[in-house]
Image (cartoon, grey):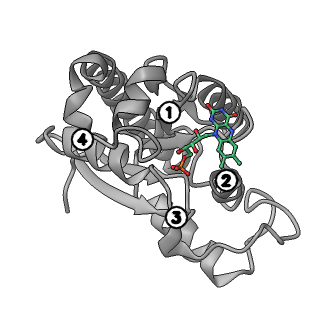
Amino acid sequence: MSTKPRIAVIIGSTRDSRFADKPAAWILELARQRADWEVELLDLRDFHLPFFNERSSNFWAPSQDPNAVAWQKKLATFDGFIFVTSEYNRSIPASLKNALDQAYREWIRKPAAALGYGSTGGARAVEHLRTIAIELQMVPVRSAVHIMGADLMKVHPMGENGPISAIEDHILPSARAMLDDLDWWTRATIAARAADAERAAA
Ligand SMILES: Cc1cc2nc3c(=O)[nH]c(=O)nc-3n(C[C@H](O)[C@H](O)[C@H](O)COP(=O)(O)O)c2cc1C
């Protein structure tokens, strides 16, 4: 079994005409350049999550919906997360909020990093995401990637629809800082969770 930290890149938007695939592919590729991580892309479209309809979060009672349970089982295999989030009315898309609500135990004491995009780089969505992550007992990391304004219009289908390489110079430093933060917190929380498990077993 691999001992490398396992990182998931989660695509938060599910709409047919989403832009999300472009930045998700870019950050996935960059994260995969770290030979000391195992990185997987999780597309919420593939999980067919219903709107949350459980008696409580799975912190208090096991979930009943089989797709929610499959989502939780998948999340449990990861040590850290990169959320690729758009901004819908100053927050994260409902699809991502629902996916966050559909698990709890699997998020606890794991770091959350973000790549946001929108007119202000998805800054307000990323801030909401951080607040939600705190309630899920995650560790929101400080650095994030923000694709905004003229840069967004260069790569968005409603603008020039160019490749991310057209703006890479602008976002690469923050992406590297974000990945470094995520690496530090992922390793710190893996060690801390292992120490907890050892203490509990003693
Ligand atoms: C319902 C809706 C609300 C939006 N609200 C915001 C917003 O508050 N701030 C912003 O910067 N962009 C907003 N936008 C524009 C999105 O940033 C843009 O459409 C982006 O491509 C959405 O991500 P997606 O294509 O990956 O779904 C909104 C778009 C939609 C469809």
- How many angstroms separate mark 2 from mark 1 (CA)? 22 Å
Q: Quarter-wise, where is residue 98 in the image?
A: bottom right
- How many angstroms separate mark 3 from mark 4 (CA)? 23 Å
Q: Position of residue 80 (x, y in %)?
A: 42, 42
Viewer-side label of 3, 4: 4
> Circle 4 sits on which residue?
163
Whether pointer 1 and pointer 3 mark residues with C-beta atoms closer than 8 Å, the reply is no
Which amino acid does the dot numbered 3 rest on?
Answer: Leu
Residue located at (36% from left, 47% from top): 24
Q: Tell me the quarter of the image containing the N terminus.
A: bottom left
Viewer-side label of 2, 3: 3
Of marks 2 and 1, which one's residue comes earlier in the chain? 2
Q: Is any atom of residue 185 visible in this view?
A: no
Q: Quarter-wise, where is residue 34 in the image?
A: top left
Of marks 3 and 4, which one's residue comes earlier in the chain? 3
Of marks 2 and 4, which one's residue comes earlier in the chain? 2
**Residue 166, labelled with which disc?**
none
Residue located at (57% from left, 63% from top): 15
Q: Quarter-wise, where is residue 82 in the image?
A: top left
Q: Position of residue 169 (x, y in %)?
A: 21, 19
Q: Is any atom of residue 111 visible in this view?
A: yes
Vertical placement of 164 versus 25: above or below?
Answer: above
